Amino acid sequence: MNKKQKIAKRKQKKRRLKLKAKRVELLKNKKVVEAKPKKAAPKKKASPKKAAPKKKATTKKDKE
């Protein structure tokens, strides 16, 4: 590893540690909010779906 690579590696390491520290700090500051149970959405009546019209299977005899 040459000198520039070592410097780059050291910078990466420092940056990674800074980011990690920042993330930990943000997590500390985050307020814990109690999750309220959501009310069940009113159920809609299931409307009957129309079946797609089926294509008639064509045979070689039909094409001629």
Image (cartoon, helix red, strand yellow):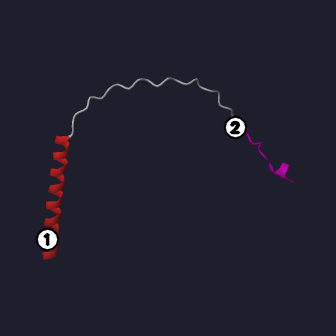
Give the left or right position of residue 25, taking residue 61 as reference.
left
- In front of the other: 51 or 30: 30
Q: Residues within 10 Å of mark 1 (few under 14, many from 20)?
A: few
Q: Name the kind of residue labelled 2 in the image.
A: Ala
Up-down relation of residue 10 to residue 26 (above or below)? below
- Residue 43: x and y in percent read 52, 23
Where is residue 36, by image quadrant? Answer: top left
Is residue 57 one of those drawn in magenta?
yes
Give the position of the N terminus as an image quadrant.
bottom left
Magenta region's main secondary structure? loop
Give the left or right position of residue 26, taking residue 51 as reference.
left
> Of marks 1 and 2, which one's residue comes earlier in the chain?
1
- Residue 57: x and y in percent read 76, 44
Is residue 17 one of those drawn in magenta?
no
Q: Which stretch is magenta?
A: 53-64
Q: Residue furthest right?
A: 64
Residue position for label 2: 52
- In front of the other: 4 or 33: 33
Residue drawn at (41%, 23%), measured in percent from left and top? 39
User: Can residue 9 be seen by looking at this rendering?
Assistant: yes
Which element carries disc 2, helix, strand or loop?
loop
Which element carries disc 1, helix, strand or loop?
helix
Q: CA distance from mark 1 to mark 2?
A: 66 Å
Numbered circle sitting on residue 7: 1
